[in-house]
């Protein structure tokens, strides 16, 4: 398990746009991270004030950041930029108080293109799944 400090050493995102609290498990081609949804996040002020729901685009971003942690852990480092998203599915709402568990698997790599599958669970239920591609660029 790795701390928020290590996450910040791997990727450039910072609050209020950092959606990975810790790395739970990391292998060569897969990674699992965690994020606690506090309810104090800025997006809840408008999405929606009387019925707070975590936006799907933020759920995707949390998976992208998880993939970026995996990329940055590799031998080449660099910054990952999302170039394609496919098969995004949202299966359940995420509300304040949820703990998100994100798992991302590297399915292929061709030159600087990394192909991933990702899934987010909250309370043991899948809330989001998708496939995405990132280009690794030098900073």
Image (cartoon, helix red, strand yellow):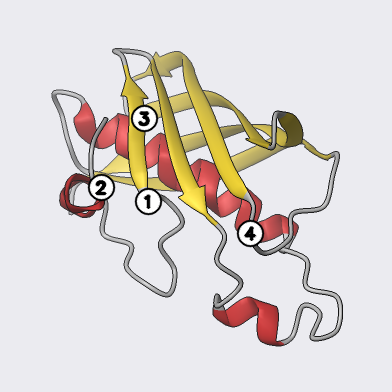
The circle on residue 24 is 3
The circle on residue 7 is 2
Q: Residue at point 21% right, 30% down?
A: 73
On the rendered structure, is 9 left or right of 132? left
Q: In terms of secondary structure, where does tag 4 sit?
A: loop
Q: Are marks 3 and 1 in contact (CB under 8 Å)?
A: no
Q: Residues within 10 Å of mark 3 (few under 14, many from 20)?
A: some
The residue beneath circle 4 is 97
Q: Residues within 10 Å of mark 2 (few under 14, many from 20)?
A: many
Q: Quadrant of residue 13?
A: bottom left
Q: CA distance from mark 2 to mark 1?
A: 7 Å
Q: Residue at point 61% right, 72% down?
A: 39
Looking at the image, tell me whether mark 2 or mark 4 is earlier in sequence order. 2
Looking at the image, tell me whether mark 2 or mark 3 is earlier in sequence order. 2
Q: Residue at point 17% right, 36% down?
A: 77
The residue beneath circle 1 is 21
In the image, residue 67 lies at what x, y percent? 42, 35
Q: Residue at point 17% right, 52% down?
A: 5
On the rendered structure, is 32 left or right of 100? left
């Amino acid at each position: 398990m790795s701390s928020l400090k290590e996450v910040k050493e791997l990727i450039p995102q910072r609050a209020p746009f950092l959606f990975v609290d810790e790395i739970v498990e990391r292998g060569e081609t897969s990674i699992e991270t965690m994020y606690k949804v506090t309810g104090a996040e800025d997006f809840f002020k408008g999405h929606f004030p009387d019925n707070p729901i975590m936006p799907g685009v933020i759920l995707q971003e949390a998976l992208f950041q998880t993939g970026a942690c995996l990329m940055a852990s590799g031998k080449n480092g660099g910054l990952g930029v999302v170039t394609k998203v496919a098969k995004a599915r949202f299966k359940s709402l995420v509300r304040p108080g949820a703990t998100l568990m994100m798992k991302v698997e590297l399915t292929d790599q061709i030159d600087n293109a990394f192909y991933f599958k990702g899934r987010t669970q909250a309370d043991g239920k899948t809330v989001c799944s998708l496939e995405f591609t990132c280009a690794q660029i030098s900073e």
